[in-house]
Image (cartoon, rainbow, N blue to C red):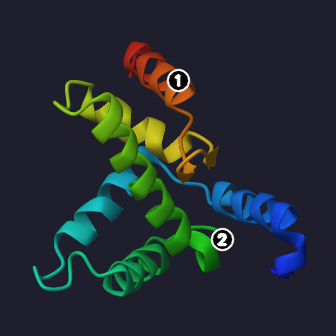
Amino acid sequence: MINFAPADRDNTRASTLECLNAVALTGAQFEAAMRAVAALPEQSRHSPAAQALALQAFADHEGIAGSVFASAALHARMAALDAWTRDHDPRREANAEAVMEAAAHQSLSQTENGIGFDPVSFGELILFVEELPF
């Protein structure tokens, strides 16, 4: 069980990151989850609660291991990708398939702006994935 006691903030943050990073995803699953959120009705698309429900339904349907944290993990990865894209690839010039794979596999970490991707290692992972022969 995770201890979310306020006095244990540093351990809680580490435990939360561990739980989010423990959810195993593929690039295709991550992309499909993003499509599930995009398919929400316009009035619900920007609602965190509606997103959470859609992502949990998606995770349950996909049978994603650790699905109790899957909705939160998917949401955190989407937010991290959004922040990285806004700051490092605003014209979306990176290979979209490589970005989806990298977003599914890159470890989330504590950044100066909250939970996200380390921008340097995430960019390097995208470049690495682009070079894979599949």
Q: Which mark is residue 120?
A: 1
Image quarter of the C terminus: top left
Q: Residue furthest left?
A: 42
Q: Could you tell me which residue is drawn at 66 percent across and 54 percent down?
A: 21
Q: Is residue 57 left or right of residue 17?
A: left
Q: Which mark is residue 47?
A: none
The percent coordinates of residue 3 (x first, y second) are 86, 79
Q: Could you tell me which residue is drawn at 70 percent across and 58 percent down?
A: 17
Q: Which element carries disc 2, helix, strand or loop?
A: loop
Q: Which mark is residue 66?
A: 2
Choose between 68 and 76: the one closer to the eye. 76
Image quarter of the N terminus: bottom right
Separation of disc 1 and disc 2 at Cα? 28 Å
Can residue 3 be seen?
A: no
Q: Which element carries disc 1, helix, strand or loop?
A: helix
- Is 35 placed above or below 95 here? below
The percent coordinates of residue 2 (x first, y second) are 84, 77
Task: Report which quarter residue 114 is drawn in.
Answer: bottom right
Going by the numbered disc 1, the residue's amino acid type is Val
The percent coordinates of residue 112 (x first, y second) are 58, 45
Q: Of the two numbered discs 1 and 2 on the same chain, state the one appearing first in sequence.
A: 2
Going by the numbered disc 2, the residue's amino acid type is Gly
Task: Report which quarter residue 86 is drawn in.
Answer: top left
Q: Could you tell me which residue is drawn at 20 percent across and 24 percent down?
A: 93
Q: Is residue 52 left or right of residue 89?
A: right
